Image (tube, rainbow, N blue to C red):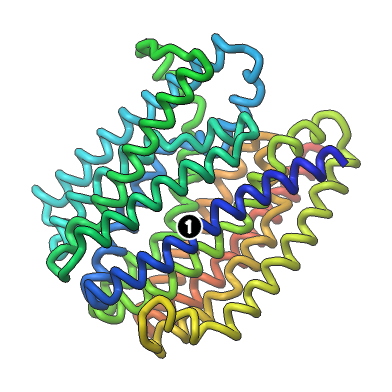
């Protein structure tokens, strides 16, 4: 009952958090799509996809094991202080490095030419990701705080685009405003956290930073592969379709990506308690995880059906008109959360047992297959082909993780 109550509380808070994301995304997309037009809207999302792929380097895998470390140090203030300072500084160093790399690729080597200015202004998102406090909130079971932070950041973003985005030429500043609003809110909340927890900012030694880079390298590598599988499709599609089609595809994909967060919420909601059960009672662990798995499958399947039935009206709400192409794409992508949920058991078992090597192998095999499917699908069938490739990637991911886990368990026996 205790674990059930904690799951419900965490999941409810995560759903509120995602509800805020969906609500703001609906309003912001409606404003941006009608103000910028399909072509500029597509470029804004393309630049965002490039930076999001880079931002996973900034997270450096601490979104996976950071909460677990915070939970273990909950009553050890000195260790918690060191961990938080080291994670933040490590992320800031990586964000600076990634910003320099993207700038050089664009300015000196001619990458991303068609939206270079957009990309430059989007680099602030790397630094907002460096200060993203979700790992702290999860580790302390304060996910409600995460919803509050998210509400402030997304609300400020919506207000800024309403005030400042008036013409298609203003597209350059959209992602900048997104990153700026998040960055300011995160800084304010870290100040509050430091004061409340009586944490001091202490300069971290190079030796400790080096250790942080080493300990999470495999989680970092696997996270990159995961984001390639999720966000790489739009970048691939940009090479085969015009900006108008790209924008119409991005409109539908935005909804699918928001929905895909639901399986991740299930993982985040039980990870801490599943870790405890895994060490103390394997039978109860398996029973607990399986119960949540069935609930997750049911919810994501119903979600897919609802989206297919109401896709026409969802697109109309976002675009202000019925975009047939976006409607069709959304119907294809509707069951991505369901197929993603299939991998829930595998991910929980990998994370609680910290099987970093297995996760790295599985995610990169999946990413390589995704790149092949997405490139082939985009080349022959444009957005329709990419949509099918993204759905197939979720199924492939489940199969690959399952096979590698079974193989690993047999080897241990």
Q: Is residue 302 left or right of residue 135?
A: right
- Quadrant location of the N terminus in the rendered image: top right
Q: Is residue 138 left or right of residue 187?
A: right
- Is 20 rendered above or below residue 33? above
Q: Is residue 22 left or right of residue 163?
A: right
Q: Residue at x 62, y 51 (%)?
A: 265
- Is 349 rendered above or below residue 106? above
- Closer-to-camera residue (29/42): 29
Task: Please say whether residue 112 is visible from this viewpoint.
Answer: no
- Quadrant location of the C terminus in the rendered image: top right
Q: Position of residue 51 (x, y in %)?
A: 31, 51
Q: Position of residue 323 (x, y in %)?
A: 38, 87
Element assignment for label 1:
helix
Q: Position of residue 236 (x, y in %)?
A: 33, 68
- Is 131 rendered above or below residue 329? above
- Closer-to-camera residue (108/93): 93
Task: Please say whether residue 310 is visible from this viewpoint.
Answer: yes
Residue closest to the far right? 283
Q: Position of residue 365 (x, y in %)?
A: 53, 55
């Amino acid at each position: 009952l205790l674990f059930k109550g904690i799951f419900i509380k965490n999941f409810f808070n995560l759903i509120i958090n995602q509800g805020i994301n969906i609500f703001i995304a609906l309003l912001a997309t409606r404003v941006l799509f009608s103000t910028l037009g399909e072509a500029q809207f597509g470029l804004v999302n393309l630049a965002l996809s490039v930076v999001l792929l880079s931002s996973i380097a900034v997270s450096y895998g601490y979104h996976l094991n950071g909460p677990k470390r915070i939970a273990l140090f909950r009553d050890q203030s000195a260790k918690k202080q060191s961990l938080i300072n080291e994670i933040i500084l490590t992320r800031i160093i990586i964000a600076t490095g990634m910003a320099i790399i993207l700038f050089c690729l664009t300015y000196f080597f001619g990458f991303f030419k068609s939206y270079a200015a957009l990309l430059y202004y989007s680099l602030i998102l790397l630094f907002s990701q460096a200060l993203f406090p979700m790992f702290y909130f999860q580790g302390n079971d304060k996910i409600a705080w995460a919803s509050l932070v998210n509400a402030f950041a997304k609300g400020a973003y919506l207000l800024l685009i309403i005030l400042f985005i008036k013409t298609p030429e203003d597209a350059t500043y959209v992602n900048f405003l997104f990153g700026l609003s998040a960055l300011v809110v995160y800084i304010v909340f870290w100040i509050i956290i430091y004061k409340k927890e009586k944490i001091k900012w202490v300069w971290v030694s190079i030796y400790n930073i080096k250790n942080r880079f080493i300990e999470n390298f495999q989680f970092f590598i696997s996270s990159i592969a995961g984001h390639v599988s999720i966000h790489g499709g739009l970048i691939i599609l940009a090479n085969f379709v015009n900006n108008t089609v790209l924008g119409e595809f991005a409109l539908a994909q935005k909804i699918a990506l928001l929905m895909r967060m639901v399986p991740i919420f299930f993982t985040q909601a039980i990870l801490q308690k599943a870790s405890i059960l895994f060490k103390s009672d394997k039978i109860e662990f398996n029973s607990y995880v399986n119960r949540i798995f069935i609930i997750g499958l049911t919810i994501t399947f119903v979600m897919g059906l609802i989206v297919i039935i109401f896709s026409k009206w969802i697109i109309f709400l976002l675009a202000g008109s019925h975009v047939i192409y976006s409607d069709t794409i959304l119907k294809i992508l509707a069951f991505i959360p369901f197929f993603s949920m299939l991998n829930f058991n595998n991910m929980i078992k990998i994370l609680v047992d910290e099987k970093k090597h297995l996760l790295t192998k599985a995610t990169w095999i999946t990413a390589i297959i995704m790149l092949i499917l997405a490139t082939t699908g985009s080349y022959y069938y444009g957005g329709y082909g990419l949509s099918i490739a993204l759905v197939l990637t979720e199924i492939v991911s489940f199969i690959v993780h399952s096979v590698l886990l079974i193989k690993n368990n047999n080897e241990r026996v």
